[in-house]
Amino acid sequence: MPRSFTYSALTLRVKPSGDSNREAWFLTAEEGLVKATVFGGAKSRLRSQVAPFHEGKLFIYHDPVKDFRKVSDFDVQSWRPGIRELWERTRTASLLAETILHSQGGGGNWAEALRLAGSVLDVLNGAAAASCTQVAAYFLWQWAQILGLKPDLFRCTRCNCEVNREDVLLFNYRKEALFCEKCAQNTDSLLRIGPGCRLWLIGIEPLPPAALEAWPVDAPSLDQATALSQAVLAAALGRRLPTWELS
């Protein structure tokens, strides 16, 4: 039985473990989420390599008897130092990492999940502070699609009517579904999804994050897109995540 494994990996979280070691969580294209121990003190080369948002080739030793994994080496190919230079970038990157960790690394679509996460982090590495909220909304919506949770923005869940481009849809938090204005019940648990929000969400689906500047969005529509993405994901995860609070 092999004990050494190589992964295409992104470091999501690192926490202290004991006096000098650390526990690290990775998103990998081959096995999804992988947790392993990083040995070494503060001056260790490996410790500096295994840091949040670093991406590259990960080498893991696995002891099958103790079911113990340790990092043997990490060949970092994307360092992304710019993420730590602005609080807005760091906050958005933390949102990305926590969302991935709490949704099991994207189900079984690990390679696509890693590609999306890496491309979003590449954009964040040099993003302006004002654009980070837009990048966050983009990631959450695309992540909902990877998980198979993206709602249909063209039809009402109840009557199945086709919604015109200029029409409004209403998301019912209790029923976790989108309704046309005719079918939506008059309750307080409704989120308005206007045509600007729908147009932006539909437009970003085929876009790489690097092309977001070519598809601008007004502030109210962006707020709606963020709220809808969070509501859809929260319904699947069973709760809202602390890093989703962007204000």
Image (tube, helix red, strand yellow):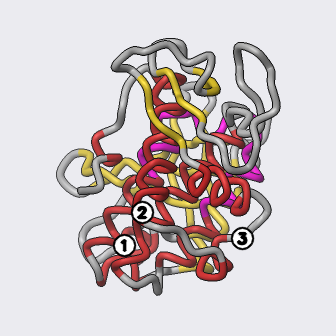
Image point (53%, 42%), residue name:
193
- Residue at the disc numbered 3: 208
Question: How busy is the neighbourhood of tag 1: few (under 14 within 10 Å), some, or many (20 plus)?
Answer: many
Tag 2, which secondary structure?
helix
Q: Earlier in the sequence, mark 2 or mark 3?
A: 2
Q: CA distance from mark 1 to mark 2?
A: 6 Å
Q: Main secondary structure of the magenta part?
A: helix
Q: Nearer the viewer, residue 122 or 224?
A: 224
The image position of residue 186, as x and y in percent, is: 43, 15
**Which numbered circle lies on residue 89?**
1
* Residue at position x 37%, y 57% in the image: 94
Side of 22 relative to 101 (left or right): left
Residue stretch rendered in magenta on the structure: 97-117
Q: Are marks 1 and 2 in contact (CB under 8 Å)?
A: yes
Whether residue 5 appears in this view of the structure is no
Give the residue pinned by disc 2.
93
Label 3 element class: loop
Comparing 14 with 230, the one in front is: 230
Crowding at dot 2, Cα within 10 Å, few <14 / some 14-19 / many 20+, comes out as many
Label 2 to label 3: alpha-carbon separation: 17 Å
Task: Say whether residue 109 is visible.
Answer: yes
Amino acid type, residue under disc 2 in the picture: Ala
